[in-house]
Amino acid sequence: WAKEEKEIKELEERSRDLESSATVSKFSDLPLSQRTLQGLQSTGYQIPTEIQKAGIPISLKGCDILGAAKTGSGKTLAFLIPVIEVLWKQRWSSVDGLGALIISPTRELDLKHEQERIRKTNIVVCTPGRLLQHMDETPGFTCNSLQVLVLDEADRILDMGFASTLNAIIENLPEERQTMLYSATQTRSVQDLARLSLQDPEYIAVHENS
Ligand code: ADP
Ligand code: MG
C-alpha cells in the first residue's frame, strides 16, 4: 500500500507540472503508472500517436478536452489510458460502482445479460440508446458516482440522430466530473454538444498521417 501511495503521489505531482510544450516521445515519458506502462509494453506500443501525445497530458491533469483527429489516429488510447489512470489513482474498486462511462457507437448486445452485470461494473462502454434504457429500466443502476465521461466518435453518434438522447443522458450525470469528447470531424453539432457537456475545455486538433 505504502509503495502504491508513493507512486500515486509522484504521478499526481508530475501530471500537475506537465507543460503542454513538454516533449513526449515515448509512453514512458508520460506520468503513467507502472502497471499501465507494463501493459503498453506487452502490446508492443512504445510511441504515442500525435493525438495521444497531445490528449493524454491534458486529461491526466484533470481538464476537460475536445479532441479532433481522423479515424485511425489512435483516439481510443488517448481517452482509455487517462480513464484507467484516473480511476486507479482514486483506488476505484468493485464496491465503488460506475466510475467511467464511455459512450460510443458500438454494437448493442443482449439487454438481459447486461442487466445482471452492469451494477457491478466500474467502466461501461455503451451506445446512447442502450444507456438511457439502463437508466430507465435497470433496477440499481446509477451514475451517481461517475468520475469520467467519454464521448467517443461524437460526430457519428450525432449523425445517427442521438443528439436529444445524449442531452437527456448528460442531464442525468453528476456535474462534478471530467469529460473527454473525441470526434473525427468538427461539425456545428459537435460544437453544440461540447458546450453542453464540457467545462473550460482544452481544444486539440491533430492533422497528420499516423
Ligand atoms: P481512432 O479511434 O482514432 O479511429 P483507434 O484508437 O481505433 O483510432 O486506433 C487505430 C489503430 O491504431 C488500432 O489498431 C490501434 O491498436 C492502433 N494504435 C493506437 N495507438 C497506437 C500506438 N501508440 N502505437 C501503435 N499502434 C497504435
Ligand atoms: Mg475510434
Image (cartoon, grey):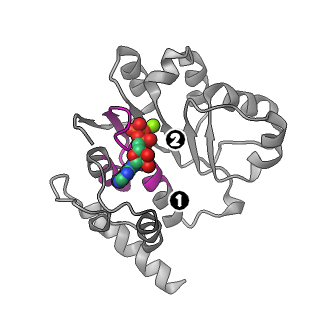
Residue 174, given in percent of the width and then of the height, sits at 57, 40
Q: What residue sits 74% from the left and 53% below the top?
A: 120
Disc 1 residue type (three-letter): Leu
Residue 71, given in percent of the width and then of the height, sits at 38, 33
**Quick check: 136 left or right of 178?**
right
Can you tell which quarter of the image residue 183 is in? top left
Q: What residue sits 55% from the left and 22% below the top?
A: 167
Viewer can see residue 163? yes
Task: Please identify the residue farthest to the bottom as the structure is shown.
Answer: 2
Residue 206, given in percent of the width and then of the height, sits at 24, 36
**Quick check: 164 left or right of 207?**
right
Q: Badge 1 local density, few (<14 within 10 Å), some, or many (20+)?
A: some
Q: CA gap, disc 2 to disc 1?
A: 12 Å
Residue range highlighted in magenta: 55-83
Dot label at residue 187:
none
> Disc 1 designates what residue?
87
